[in-house]
Image (cartoon, helix red, strand yellow):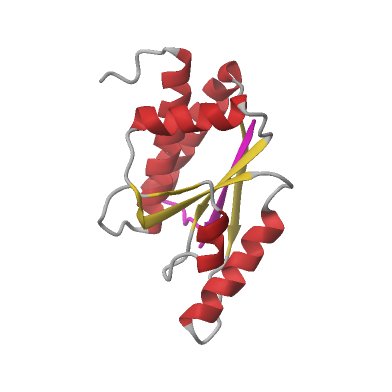
Amino acid sequence: MKISVFAVGRMKAGPEKELADRYFERFSKSGPAVGLEFSGIAEIPESRAQGTAERKREEGDRLRQHLASGAALILLDERGKNISSEDFATRIAALRDGGRRAMTVAIGGPDGHDPSLRETAELVLSFGAQTWPHQMVRVMLGEQLYRAATILSGHPYHRA
């Protein structure tokens, strides 16, 4: 299954980008052994629309254009479900084993995701109730995708 990341906002050079890139690189190397292929990160600039609802709608429309036909959509949102790393890995494996060919994990802009996307997402996921900076979310997502691949392969990186 091909896994891509869609992000509203650009990641600037610096230690956060280096760390995120390191985890995504680890995932791209470890994922194929368990049927997960990292197909990259698509970045778009934040919408410049005046109102919050309009900004969310514009960014949501751009995400819909990016989604492969039949792709599973996972939204990252502070109001989403807070699940364990093992559960995250199990959910990814279930999508893969259920015949899904693609999955996109979306990081929204400062205003969050359009409500219509929340209705169609396979999972709305939270990395905790706190609000995290965009750069940190990328690091955490890269690490969790890498961790999911190691969990699925039985690698000792993840110890419970």
Q: Position of residue 10 (x, y in %)?
A: 52, 60
Q: Position of residue 100 (x, y in %)?
A: 66, 34
Q: Is residue 7 magenta?
A: yes
**Residue at (57, 67) in percent of width and height:** 45
135 vs 55, left or right, is left
Residue 146 visible, this orientation: no
Query: Would residue 159 be found to the left or right of residue 138 on screen?
Result: left
| Viewer-proximal residue among 82 and 22 | 82
Looking at the rendering, the stretch of residues picked out in magenta corresponds to 1-14
Is residue 98 something one can see in this rendering?
Answer: yes
Residue 16 location (% of width, % of height): 38, 47
Whether 8 is among the magenta residues is yes
Q: Residue, x 50% and y 67% (percent of image)?
A: 115
Quadrant in the picture for residue 71: top right
Number of numbered discs overlaid on the protein picture: 0
**Of residues 48 and 94, which is closer to you in this image?**
94
Quadrant assignment for the N terminus: top right
Q: Would you identify the image quadrant in which residue 20 lies?
A: top left
Q: Measured from the top left, where is residue 8 in percent x and y? A: 52, 62
Please determine whether, in this image, residue 142 is positioned above or below residue 133: above
Residue farthest toward the right in the current orientation of the protein: 69
Image quadrant assignment for residue 102: top right
Position above or below: 77 against 71: below
Q: Quadrant of the C terminus?
A: top left
Which residue is found at the position 67% from the left and 29% from the top? Answer: 99
